[in-house]
Image (cartoon, rainbow, N blue to C red):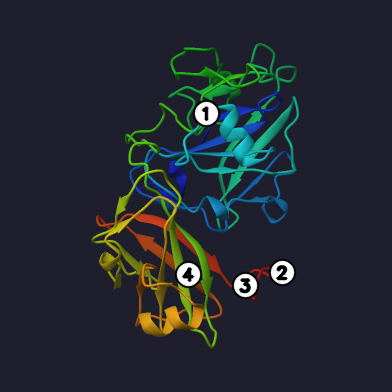
Amino acid sequence: MAIPASAQMRITEWMYSGGDGEFIELTNVGGDAISLAGWTYDDDSADPTQGFDLSALGVVQPGESVVLTEIDAELFRGNYNLCSGVKILGGYSNNLGRADQINLFDAADQLVDRLTYGDQTFPGTIRTQDASGWVSAAGLGLDDVAQWTLSTVGDAEGSLAGSNGNPASPGRSTRATVPYDPCANGGVLRITEYMYSGTDGEFIEFSNTGNAPLNVVGWSYSDSARLVGDVDLSAYAIIQPGESVILTESSASDFRQAWGLCEGTKVIGGLSSNLGRSDEINLYDAQGNAIDQLTYGDQSFPGTIR
């Protein structure tokens, strides 16, 4: 029987208290990309409807590890000297305690993974205060804290000391079955702005948030149809670090004129697969891998923007 794609996402590291920031690491240990749109995390209240929304983590590639932390994302990144390619979601408020539970729910509110821990509740198990814990291969996907090891500098996970001395290895896990290096390319394309309807032209903005040029020949966009190759983005060619490019239903010249943009701004016009009030924006690379996704709709997600 095939394993559901959601079952590829696993809790692989956590630290409930530390000067470098409480955090949880999730890793895609399978061979397929997974969108975390609509997924949530919660502690021992185990309520997906009240949990912390993970949608901003977007699509998680095979082998990729992503991080949730209670502190500011960029502060955490600096504490562990993580490159810009490591996805970090900061500011969660349902904090972990010494004895607690980590619950991961998918978009259908189904439990995907759980870790119940507490060194007092389960004598002889680790206490992740000022050092993280990581899961063994045997313990992956099991709710068994006895299968977890306390991090030390230079251990099998390659743990390093954070700015405040807390050993951990956030953003990478040896539990991954597919190699993934978030820092290898340096170029990272993300969906950064959109308007689904307006007199100045519906548009989507993509930005290279990485630190190296990115060749997007063969890349494509699709809406909720999720058709790889639907709208070809090859005309952007090379996108420089910090550069933003535009996809619009208007002509490129009309869009530039409407927004006062110079000729140097890359605009692909004539988009025919238009966005609706409730829709998706999907970005694919030249191999058809899902790179980023935004699922939106003010009616579907009350309180969000229109």
18 versus 187 height, above or below: above
Whole-angstrom CA distance, mark 3 to mark 1, is 37 Å
Dot 4 or dot 1, earlier in sequence: 1
**Res. 21 visible in picture:** yes
Q: Which residue corresponds to mark 4?
A: 280
Residue 9 placement, left or right of 79 = left
Mark nearer the viewer, 3 or 1: 1
Disc 2 and disc 4: Cα gap in Å?
17 Å
Residue 50, percent across and down?
73, 53
Secondary structure beneath label 1: loop
Q: Nearer the viewer, mark 3 or mark 4?
A: 4
Report whether 126 appears left or right of 279: right
Tell me where residue 243 sits by quadrant.
bottom left
| Tag in front: 2 or 1 | 1
Q: Residues within 10 Å of mark 4 (few under 14, many from 20)?
A: some
- Between the C-alphas of marks 3 and 4, the distance is 12 Å
